[in-house]
């Protein structure tokens, strides 16, 4: 059970956020409000009031970031993207959520479980809760516009990773105890954190897997900064990269190490063009993964056999997840368009759900999946399109490296449910910067075209 301090931290976080906005510029204040809450606040602790979303480590920082941007920093910002594809996708998701509620009014009465049907009151709750979870995305999309903004975001991300690494190293050595010591309980299964004669660090993220993917994303940011020789000397940046690679290895996340390689090799050793193509390929596999599973062409068995000689335990775990996906996907087909809704209605009585994609597909159907993964995919596509308009090598490298990080976040949602406020912040920032590049180019290009026309006349 959570102790009193766990609830106290949620109560005082709005005060912390207010102080951050009073003392800092808007981008670092927003970053530390959202990411600080994700990294430090307790897992599984919330204030759950009727008819409104639970107030917890995801929703409280998001609300305070919006409040801080709009009313303390006086930034013109709205609850939805001001226009374009992203706004339409979020609205589509909300419309799909309404459809989900109204097509799931029937109760589920099976052996050993009874789940009531959804009612109209669940419509408001679902829209508000998902809107709050997407709020970091919406904020970053409207906040990150320039090269300097994007560079500052990645610097802050690396700094957050380096600071958090102190706690990670402590738990690698001493076992994952911090959440229990500070907040009074351990947030997950202890057995899942024991690996290879040691421990996965958990810190305040809930599971060792989430720590590992966090390190992967920080590593990606550090690699990009090293590539463009920012913010300090190349030698120091390379030291940070090596430190993060070692930390990722010690965190004992096999899948995360593979994703780390997916980032390291293209950013470090390949051209911008090839890195962009890899980002496009990885993100395309992620968004079309459900279709590949439905038509039974994804090489599940081949992947299991490929991993077996390297790590038999991981191969067995992956095979088990694939088998669960097949059963859950069969159930999802019964409510293909709008999904089954929450309260574990989308699950079988004994099923295990690990991947974010199958949870999303099961709960919200193909509309919900297309809307949410469409937001991520849009970031990678727009970054690639905007990169073709750029001539500055450092800015282009930063943009493509950022898109590769988003692609890795996307592909991690196949085996894991790791989406969080930090990741939505990163995804929204990539779209915001990509859209700003196209706007800048159009402002510059149109007068040039007019000048040439008038000159010819």
Image (tube, rainbow, N blue to C red):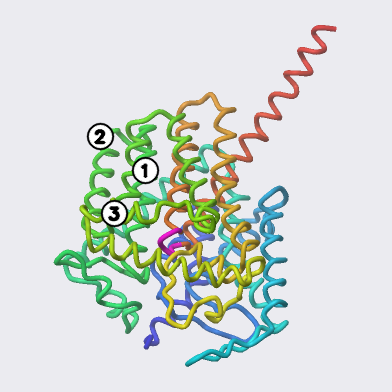
Q: Quadrant of the N terminus?
A: bottom left
Q: Position of residue 60 (x, y in %)?
A: 53, 72
Left/right of residue 407 with respect to residue 80 in the rendered view: left
Q: Which callout, 1 or 3, points at the residue further toward the start of the chain?
A: 1
Left/right of residue 37 with respect to residue 103 in the rendered view: left
Q: Which residues are magenta?
A: 414-418
Q: Is residue 336 magenta?
A: no
Q: Position of residue 354 (x, y in %)?
A: 42, 68
Q: In the displayed structure, would residue 17 be above or below residue 75?
A: below
Neighbour tally class for label 1: few under 14, some 14-19, many 20 plus, Cα within 10 Å: many
Q: Which callout, 3 or 2, points at the residue further toward the start of the chain?
A: 2
Query: Which residue is the site of mark 1?
Result: 263
Q: In the displayed structure, would residue 270 be above or below residue 380?
A: above
State the SS at label 3: helix
Q: In this view of the protein, can residue 414 be seen by the observer?
A: yes
Q: CA distance from mark 2 to mark 1?
A: 19 Å
For discs 3 and 2, the disc positioned in front in the rendered view: 3
Q: Quadrant of the C terminus?
A: top right
- Residue located at (81% from left, 7% from top): 456
Circles 2, 1 touching at the beta carbon (< 8 Å)? no
Q: In this view of the protein, can residue 33 be seen by the observer?
A: no
Query: Which residue is the site of mark 3?
Result: 305
Q: CA distance from mark 1 to mark 3?
A: 24 Å
Neighbour tally class for label 3: few under 14, some 14-19, many 20 plus, Cα within 10 Å: some
């Amino acid at each position: 059970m959570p102790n009193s301090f766990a609830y106290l931290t949620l109560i005082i976080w709005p005060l912390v956020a207010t102080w951050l906005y009073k003392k800092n510029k808007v981008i670092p204040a927003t970053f530390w409000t959202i990411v600080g809450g994700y990294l430090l606040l307790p897992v599984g602790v919330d204030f759950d009031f009727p008819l409104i979303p639970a107030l917890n480590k995801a929703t409280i920082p998001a609300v305070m970031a919006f409040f801080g941007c709009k009313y303390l920093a006086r930034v013109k910002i709205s609850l939805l993207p001001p226009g374009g594809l992203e706004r339409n996708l979020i609205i589509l998701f909300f419309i799909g959520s309404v459809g989900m509620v109204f097509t799931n009014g029937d109760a589920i009465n099976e052996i050993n479980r009874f789940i009531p049907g959804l009612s109209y009151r669940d419509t408001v709750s679902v829209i508000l809760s998902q809107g709050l979870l997407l709020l970091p995305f919406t904020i970053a999309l409207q906040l990150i516009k320039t090269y300097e903004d994007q560079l500052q975001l990645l610097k802050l991300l690396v700094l957050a990773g380096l600071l958090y690494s102190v706690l990670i190293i402590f738990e690698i050595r001493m076992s994952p105890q911090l959440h229990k010591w500070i907040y009074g309980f351990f947030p997950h299964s202890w057995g899942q954190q024991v690996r290879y004669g040691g421990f996965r660090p958990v810190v305040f993220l809930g599971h060792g897997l989430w720590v590992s993917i966090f390190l992967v994303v920080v590593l990606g940011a550090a690699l990009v900064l090293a590539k463009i020789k920012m913010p300090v000397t190349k030698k120091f940046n390379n030291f940070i990269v090596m430190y993060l690679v070692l930390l990722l290895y010690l965190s004992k996340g096999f899948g995360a190490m593979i994703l780390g390689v997916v980032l390291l090799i293209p950013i470090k050793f390949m051209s911008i063009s090839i890195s962009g193509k890899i980002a496009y390929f990885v993100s395309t596999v992620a968004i079309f993964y459900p279709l590949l599973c439905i038509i039974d062409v994804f090489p599940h068995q081949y992947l299991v056999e490929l991993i077996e000689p390297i790590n038999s335990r991981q191969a067995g775990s992956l095979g088990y997840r694939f088998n669960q996906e097949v059963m859950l996907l069969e159930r999802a087909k019964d409510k293909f368009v709008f999904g089954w809704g929450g309260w574990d209605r989308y699950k079988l009585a004994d099923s295990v759900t690990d991947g974010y994609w199958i949870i999303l597909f099961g709960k919200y159907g193909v509309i919900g999946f297309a809307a949410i993964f469409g937001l991520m995919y849009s970031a990678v596509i727009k970054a690639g399109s905007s990169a073709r308009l750029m001539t500055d090598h450092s800015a282009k490298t930063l943009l493509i490296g950022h898109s590769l990080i988003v692609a890795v976040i996307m592909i991690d949602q196949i085996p894991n449910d790791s989406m969080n406020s930090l990741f939505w912040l990163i995804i929204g920032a990539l779209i915001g910067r990509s859209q700003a590049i196209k706007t800048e180019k159009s402002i510059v290009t149109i007068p040039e075209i007019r000048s040439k026309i008038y000159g010819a006349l």
